[in-house]
Amino acid sequence: MSAPATTNRANSQHSTGPKTAEGKQRSSRNALRHGLTSQIAVMPTEDLDLYESHKKSFVDEYNPQGATEQPLVQSLADISWRQNRIVAIESNLLKFSTMVVMPENDTRNLANLSLHSQRLARQFERTVAQLRDLQQARIAQQRQDLQTVLEIVDLYQSEGETYDPSEDGFV
């Protein structure tokens, strides 16, 4: 083994990360600066009730049915929440920059926010398209099922019989 590899291996033994549960919890949030790429949608400093109301507006608008549509609507609410956060962060950066000359770091941050905003906008558009395709397919299938039931009912009626669609699983 080479000398640098031996040295690196020895140094790595000193960097084993946090030991306590509190330290591990704290370090798990190290990358949570703006929350635009995190797995959690609502930052600890944000109002969870306001987020739930935001999410409900998406559920009300898209009325998701089934296990495939529901996570897509959840994703739309999360993406939109993050987009709103970008607007707030940009506003704060620009508000403070009018008070003093904008530091180079803030200029970089604004450019970075713009990239996140574009990524989220594309993600939102793709998710809406996917959800609409699924919902259109579901509605087309429901119409086809209804047409089938109507044809069966007509057939039974033409022979003077009655037909209960629920016996064959139709709702």
Image (cartoon, rainbow, N blue to C red):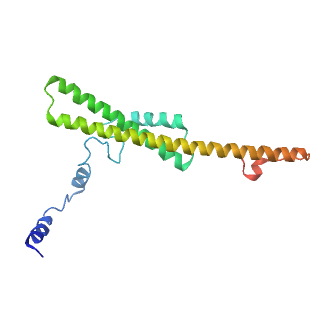
The number of callouts visible is 0
In this rendering, the answer to whether 79 lies above or below 31 is above
Which residue lies at the image location 75% right of the left edge and 48% below the top edge?
Answer: 166
Q: Is residue 74 left or right of residue 16?
A: right
Q: Residue 48's spot in the image, x, y percent?
A: 38, 37
Which residue lies at the image location 28% right of the left edge and 37% below the top edge?
Answer: 113
Q: Is residue 152 left or right of residue 82?
A: right
Judged from this view, the residue extending furthest toward the bottom is 1
Q: Quadrant of the N terminus?
A: bottom left
Judged from this view, the residue extending furthest toward the top is 99
Q: Can you see residue 171?
A: no
Q: Is residue 115 left or right of residue 139?
A: left
Q: Can you see residue 58?
A: yes
Query: Picture quarter containing residue 10?
Result: bottom left
Toward the viewer: 9 or 141? 141
Q: Residue 71's spot in the image, x, y percent?
A: 48, 46
Which residue lies at the image location 51% right of the left edge and 37% below the top edge?
Answer: 59
Q: Residue 171's spot in the image, x, y percent?
A: 71, 46
Judged from this view, the residue extending furthest toward the right is 160
Which residue lies at the image location 32% right of the left edge and 36% below the top edge?
Answer: 46
Q: Residue 6's spot in the image, x, y percent?
A: 11, 72
In this rendering, the answer to whether 22 lies above or below 15 is above
